[in-house]
């Protein structure tokens, strides 16, 4: 399915401002400011300055939060986003309510305790982000994530993403276990002009007990589409 750009000039804007460059600018800005987020339940809160607000919005990290402080902008990062900024980009520190900094191992265990599927979801998130896809929550479409070629203001999302586990994992989200689930998901994706992308994560025996598993996992990509028997490989013969 070809990308569906939003209006004239959107594709040119995206090409002129690659997502990889925006993320690098964000990484530099957060690193220079010694950025620090606050762990709050299953999310991380971060107070951004004007430059970082622009970069976070352009890079599609976090969700802006409206507050009474008009001169300050707060963002809420999901688990996968926060861990990506901390672990992969190494540009964000995370503290708890007592202002104690969480190390990578502590944060991994904390997030895993709150969300048993966190390791698989993070690996899928990182996999797509490293390929410069913009990854956003997909609950409104009944999937785990949706993937955009660039900023959602410029282009519609192309993929509806489901994350499955293999090996030591138990596929705790319970998706695609029966054909009816396949058919319902594919029909839903088709109705919103998206391709179903299934990412199967294998821990290869690591058990996802620590972030060190991120050096040993494997991931399989599969796109699933609905075949219509009315389709023909060749144009019907003209009589």
Image: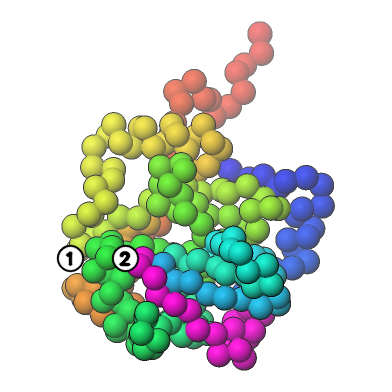
Classify mark 1: helix, strand or loop.
loop
Per the rendering, the mark at residue 2 is: none
Look at 58% across and 55% down and name the residue there. 148
Q: Which range is magenta?
A: 24-42
Numbered-mark total: 2
Ranked by sequence position, the earlier of labels 2 and 1 is 2
x and y, in percent, of residue 186 in the image? 42, 36
**Residue that numbered label 2 is attached to:** 118
x and y, in percent, of residue 101 in the image? 38, 88
Q: Quadrant of residue 204?
A: bottom left
x and y, in percent, of residue 230 in the image? 49, 20
**Residue that numbered label 1 is attached to:** 168
Tell me the crowding category of disc 1: few under 14, some 14 to 19, or many 20 or more residues within 10 angstroms, Cα based: some
Q: Quadrant of residue 11?
A: bottom right
Q: How is the image coloured?
A: rainbow
Left or right: where 63 falls relative to 196: right
Quick one: which residue is furthest to the right in this view?
9
- Closer to the camera in the image, 226 or 182: 182
* Circles 2 and 1 in contact, beta carbons < 8 Å: no
Q: Is residue 32 magenta?
A: yes
Kindly report the distance in space between the C-alpha atoms of the residues bearing marks 2 and 1: 14 Å
Classify mark 2: helix, strand or loop.
helix
Rendered-image quadrant of the C terminus? top right
Q: Is residue 216 shown above or below 165?
A: below
Tell me the crowding category of disc 2: few under 14, some 14 to 19, or many 20 or more residues within 10 angstroms, Cα based: some
Query: Disc 2 vs disc 1: which is toward the camera?
Result: 2
Residue 71 visible? The answer is yes
Look at 17% across and 65% down and name the residue there. 168
Look at 24% across and 37% down and name the residue there. 178
Q: Is residue 149 shown above or below 210?
A: above
């Amino acid at each position: 399915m070809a990308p569906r750009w939003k209006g004239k000039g959107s594709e040119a804007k995206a090409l002129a401002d690659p997502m990889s460059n925006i993320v690098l600018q964000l990484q530099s800005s957060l690193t220079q400011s010694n950025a620090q987020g606050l762990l709050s339940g299953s999310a991380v809160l971060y107070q951004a300055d004007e430059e970082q607000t622009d970069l976070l919005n352009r890079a599609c990290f976090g969700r802006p939060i409206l507050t009474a402080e008009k001169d300050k902008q707060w963002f809420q990062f999901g688990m996968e986003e926060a861990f990506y900024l901390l672990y992969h980009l190494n540009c964000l520190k995370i503290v708890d309510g007592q202002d104690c900094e969480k190390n990578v191992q502590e944060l991994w265990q904390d997030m895993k305790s709150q969300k048993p599927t966190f390791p698989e979801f993070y690996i899928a998130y990182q996999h797509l982000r490293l390929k410069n896809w913009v990854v956003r929550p997909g609950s409104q479409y009944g999937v785990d994530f949706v993937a955009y070629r660039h900023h959602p203001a410029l282009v519609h999302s192309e993929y509806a993403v489901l994350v499955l586990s293999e090996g030591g994992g138990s596929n705790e989200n319970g998706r695609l276990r029966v054909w009816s689930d396949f058919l319902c998901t594919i029909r839903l994706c088709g109705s919103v002009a998206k391709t179903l992308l299934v990412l199967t994560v294998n821990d290869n025996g690591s058990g996802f007990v620590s972030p060190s598993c991120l050096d040993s996992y494997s991931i399989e990509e599969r796109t699933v589409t609905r075949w219509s028997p009315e389709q023909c490989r060749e144009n019907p013969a003209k009589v």
